[in-house]
Amino acid sequence: QVQLVESRGGLVQPGGSLRLSCAASGSIFSINPMGWYRQAPGKQRELVATITSSGSRNYADSVKGRFTISRDNTKNTVYLQMNNLKPEDTAVYYCYAHILSSSYSFSDYWGQGTQVTVSS
């Protein structure tokens, strides 16, 4: 049974910072890629950032230069450092992982989602 557990989000003032983490657990052989998506009210879920097992990163244009994704392969954990947050970053953030499990099959897994609110 594979599970993704995210850290808690929170309320942040504009210009502030927040760090999210997401740990994958279970019978995992490999994870590639891991990443973050977000969904604002009334909008579709969108890509925020992804990172491969070798460290290649991909960012949405809206977060480039402000957000940094990283991962610890020894802990099956991905992080999202969010700086200079803007009100338009307000959304539910979801962790994502493409995992090869012990059943020798690839599957997509999602975290439960964590609310990030940017407001003064």
Image (spheres, rainbow, N blue to C red):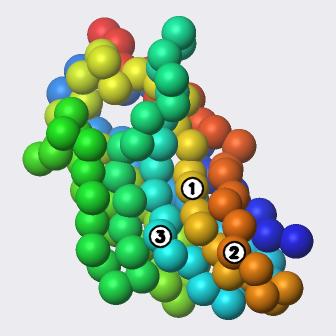
Q: Quadrant of the C terminus?
A: top left
SS for dot 3: strand
- Amino acid, disc 3: Pro
User: Separation of disc 3 and disc 2 at Cα?
Assistant: 11 Å
Helix, strand or loop status at disc 1: strand
* Vertical placement of residue 24 versus 63, above or below: below
> Is 119 situated left or right of 94 in this image?
left
Whether residue 43 is situated above or below residue 23 in the rendered picture? above
Question: In the rendered image, is residue 104 in sight?
Answer: yes
Residue 75: % across, % down: 57, 82
Front of the two marks 2 and 1: 2
> What is the residue that sits farthest to the front in this orientation?
105
Q: Is residue 110 or residue 104 the one in the foreground?
A: 104
Along the polypeptide, which appears first: circle 3 or circle 2? 3
Left or right: 60, with 31 as reference point: left
> Tag on residue 106?
2
Of callouts 2 and 1, the N-terminal one: 1
Residue 44, percent across and down? 51, 23
Q: Amino acid at mark 1?
A: Tyr
Split into 4 quadrants, where in the image is the N terminus?
A: bottom right
Residue underneath mark 3: 33
Which amino acid lies under the numbered mark 2 shown in the image of this protein? Answer: Phe
Q: Which image quadrant is residue 30 in?
A: bottom right
What number is the disc on residue 96? 1
Q: Is residue 9 visible?
A: no
Looking at the image, which is closer to me, 25 or 98? 98
